[in-house]
Image (cartoon, rainbow, N blue to C red):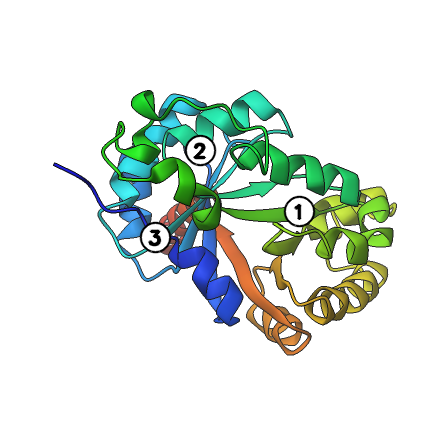
Amino acid sequence: MSQPMPSNLFKQQLAAGELQLGAFLGLADAYSAEVMASTDFDWLLIDGEHGPNDVRTILAQLQVLAAYPVSAVVRPADHNTATIKQLLDIGAQSLMIPMVESAEQAEQLVQAMRYPPAGIRGVGAGMARAARWNGVPGYLNRANDNLCLVAQIESSAGLVEIEAIAAVDGVDGLFLGPADLAAEMGYLGQPGHIEVRKAIEIALPKIRAAGKAAGIYCSAPEVAESYRTLGATFLLIGADTMLLRSAADAHLKRFRL
């Protein structure tokens, strides 16, 4: 029995400029991921850069998230082409790649995500969940159009090249990482520093002017609103780890009178 081609709602919403609020999944657990999916987040980022995720834990989380009306995005640890191939084959359709600093790097990432002749993605649809193990008719010819690439900008080099990166065909969005930007600018642990804010306020309009979706991490509602006025449409506003700890800490304080 043939299977339908999975659509990529996240990619569609980025293109439409719709507001999307998301959270990091760093607990590396399918059960906790499903708890997060049962809320009203628009997207959830399975984090393989800082969270202790591997291909198997990412697969398990993709499987449970598929049952909910939430978009799943995966962040690998680096630009490794083999890892990208594995993530796409297990069903990840949207990837956020950390520390993109040039158009050349962005072009290489686009190549890694696409089948030939448009790219270099290895062909193994018979073993790929993404293709429903050859159950999706014409998957190989249709896959490229349903994949979404978000380039993460988190260094001064990336800021300098942001317009060139945004101009790369196949890059759907650019996501600013204030924590690493702050550290690289000499303000470690101060993502809200005025100089970091200034850099962000310059970068967001550049992304939008290039016709690409702009995203950013921000946990303060008032700051998030200011970034939205500058063109940010997809935001990460928390993390499962931080939400769990803060809720547990607040609950405990109610009893320690």
Is any part of residue 218 visible from this angle? yes
| 126, 236: nearer the viewer | 126
Q: Which residue is mark 1?
A: 152
What is the three-letter code of the residue carrying label 3? Ser
Residue 34, quarter of picture:
top left
Q: Which circle's residue, 3 or 2, is located before the other in the chain?
A: 3
What is the three-letter code of the residue carrying label 1? Gln
Q: Which circle's residue, 2 or 1, is located before the other in the chain?
A: 2
Judge the density around disc 3: few (<14), some (14-19), many (≥20) Cα neighbours within 10 Å: few
Outermost residue to the left: 1
Q: Is residue 157 left or right of residue 167?
A: right
Q: Secondary structure at mark 3?
A: loop
Q: Which residue is mark 2?
A: 88
123, above or below 24, in the image: above
Disc 3 from disc 1: Cα separation:
23 Å
Residue 70, quarter of picture:
bottom left
